Image: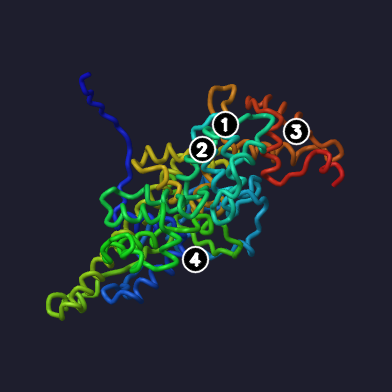
């Protein structure tokens, strides 16, 4: 039998140390980034801030015009952007959407917990109704640290009698969720959590093979006897063991904890959308961090002792990586913000009812980036608009086909429901079935249960409860 040659095409993300740092910085909020920079400057003598750096002048308006359709005066939209706190903000709703009423020109997007963050990504995934239901059941069983806390039998029981899911089906959907942001969520053990994250690294990463072996079989021994004794037991060189252990320590053992937080978070806009000359534009909110290499210490390289020279060279490399990663982060956020504004100009012009369906994949394909990069760039990143300050991810939602041949986004449908409920007779509130009929009359065919889901997402009581109120 003649051997056959098979060629397989696929995508593989190569994570170099520089790329890992860029990814980590991208997922930080603006407040966390500032803290990270302060720590880096304090700990690296080759890195310093440019104290004399001044904000670049801008031709954008100082304050976006109250009416989105009008042009504003000249100025800088990055000035006088207030810091907000979740516990100080006037927010209605608790499911990640800003206020949908058109009378409000100031909205603030609510923070999502881990379950909502994963559900948002699930809704934007290209899955059928059956797999999506399985995904919802899995996500509901993931704890705050990001681990799946129940066996597949419990997931099967939760899906019955509507869906008779096999373990293989559940495993397939779980594998997809484990590669959502944050990577490793949905793992059933620390070993699996670390293995998933290691699987994202380039095969040429130093220490990767041994790190995988440690994660799979020797975590308990590593904690019990330490790297040096374990290296002797496994007949590994001490340097190789330390390299592998360092790689493991760079991973996140509790990937969900970064998303699940009960503490108040300051909101600092990352970008500002404003209208000028009839065109919507985007500017960075505030000047980017101004860092540079300390030339005095750099000149010592090559003249210091061997140990000092090696230290300075390593710190110089770290400083250059950080500066480059910050530039990459700023460029990525600005590109994503511009794509959002370009896609959602209808929202800026007319309000939530004009929001169009938008998925991570659409923006990823437009910008030539990976979907996971867009996910990181839209989490806890905020866009200030004339209609309020919103998390980037607020502008993403799945769509429902309309009778006219287009699509209506979930956000737009929620805005329509809020309008219909706001205009109802308080003595005879509209039932979910009646609301579905009214939406169908406007060309949007939705089922009663879909209306109920959207109503509950907006924290609006049922018709019976509204009548009593």
Label 2 crowd (10 A; few <14 / some 14-19 / many >=20) = some
Secondary structure of the residue carrying tag 1 is loop
Where residue 259 appears, x then y in whole percent? Answer: 53, 56
Closer to viewer: mark 1 or mark 3: 1
Label 1 crowd (10 A; few <14 / some 14-19 / many >=20) = few
Frontmost residue, 4 versus 8: 4
Above or below, 325 relative to 302? above
40 displayed left or right of 438: left
Asked if the residue at tag 3 contacts the one at tag 2, i.e. Cβ–Cβ closer than 8 Å, the answer is no
Question: Which residue is tagged 3?
Answer: 432
**Residue that extends furthest to the left in the rendered view of this protein:** 303
**Which numbered disc flags the more N-terminal residue, 1 or 2?**
1
Alpha carbon distance from label 4 to label 2:
50 Å
Where residue 370 appears, x then y in whole percent? Answer: 37, 43
Above or below, 239 relative to 99? below
Asked if the residue at tag 2 contacts the one at tag 1, i.e. Cβ–Cβ closer than 8 Å, the answer is no
Secondary structure of the residue carrying tag 3 is helix
**Which numbered disc flags the more N-terminal residue, 2 or 3?**
2
**Residue that extends furthest to the front in the rendered view of this protein:** 233
The part of the image, by quadrant, that contains residue 221 is bottom left
Q: Residue 80: which numbered mark, if any?
A: 4
Secondary structure of the residue carrying tag 2 is helix
């Amino acid at each position: 039998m003649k051997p056959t040659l098979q060629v397989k095409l696929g995508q593989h993300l190569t994570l170099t140390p520089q790329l890992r740092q860029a990814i980590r910085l991208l997922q930080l909020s603006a407040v966390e980034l500032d803290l990270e920079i302060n720590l880096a400057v304090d700990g690296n003598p080759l890195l310093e801030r440019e104290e004399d750096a001044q904000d670049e002048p801008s031709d954008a308006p100082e304050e976006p015009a109250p009416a989105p359709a009008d042009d504003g005066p000249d100025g800088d939209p990055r000035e006088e952007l207030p810091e907000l706190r979740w516990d100080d903000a006037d927010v209605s709703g608790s499911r990640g959407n800003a206020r949908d009423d058109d009378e409000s020109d100031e909205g603030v997007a609510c923070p999502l917990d881990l379950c909502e963050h994963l559900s948002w990504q699930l809704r934007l995934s290209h899955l059928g109704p059956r797999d999506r239901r399985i995904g919802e059941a899995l996500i509901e069983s993931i704890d705050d640290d990001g681990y799946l806390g129940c066996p597949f039998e419990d997931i099967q029981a939760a899906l019955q009698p509507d869906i008779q899911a096999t373990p293989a089906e559940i495993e397939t959907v779980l594998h997809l969720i484990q590669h959502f942001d944050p990577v490793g969520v949905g793992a059933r053990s620390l070993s699996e959590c670390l293995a998933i994250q290691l699987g994202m690294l380039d095969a040429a990463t130093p220490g990767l093979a041994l790190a995988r072996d440690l994660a799979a079989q020797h975590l308990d021994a590593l904690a019990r006897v330490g790297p040096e004794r374990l290296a002797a037991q496994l007949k590994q060189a001490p340097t190789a063991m330390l390299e592998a252990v360092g790689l493991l320590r760079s991973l996140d053992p509790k990937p969900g904890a970064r998303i699940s937080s009960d503490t108040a978070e300051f909101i600092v806009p990352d970008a500002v959308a404003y209208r000028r000359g009839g065109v919507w534009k985007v500017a960075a909110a505030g000047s980017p961090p101004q860092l540079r290499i300390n030339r005095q210490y750099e000149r010592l390289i090559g003249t210091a002792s061997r140990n000092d020279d090696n230290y300075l060279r390593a710190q110089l490399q770290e400083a250059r990586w950080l500066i480059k990663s910050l530039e990459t982060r700023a460029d990525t956020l600005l590109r994503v913000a511009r794509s959002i504004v370009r896609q959602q100009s209808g929202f800026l012009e007319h309000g939530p009812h004009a929001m169009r369906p938008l998925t991570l994949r659409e923006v990823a394909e437009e910008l030539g980036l990976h979907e996971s990069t867009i996910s990181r760039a839209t989490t806890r990143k905020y866009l200030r608009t004339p209609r309020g300050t919103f998390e980037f991810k607020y502008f993403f939602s799945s769509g429902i086909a309309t009778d006219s041949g287009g699509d209506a986004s979930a956000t737009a449908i929620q805005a329509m429901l809020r309008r219909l409920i706001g205009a109802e007779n308080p003595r005879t509130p509209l039932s979910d079935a009646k609301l579905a009929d009214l939406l169908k009359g406007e060309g949007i065919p939705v089922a009663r249960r879909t209306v109920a889901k959207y109503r509950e997402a907006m924290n609006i009581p049922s018709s019976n409860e509204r009548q009593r109120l």
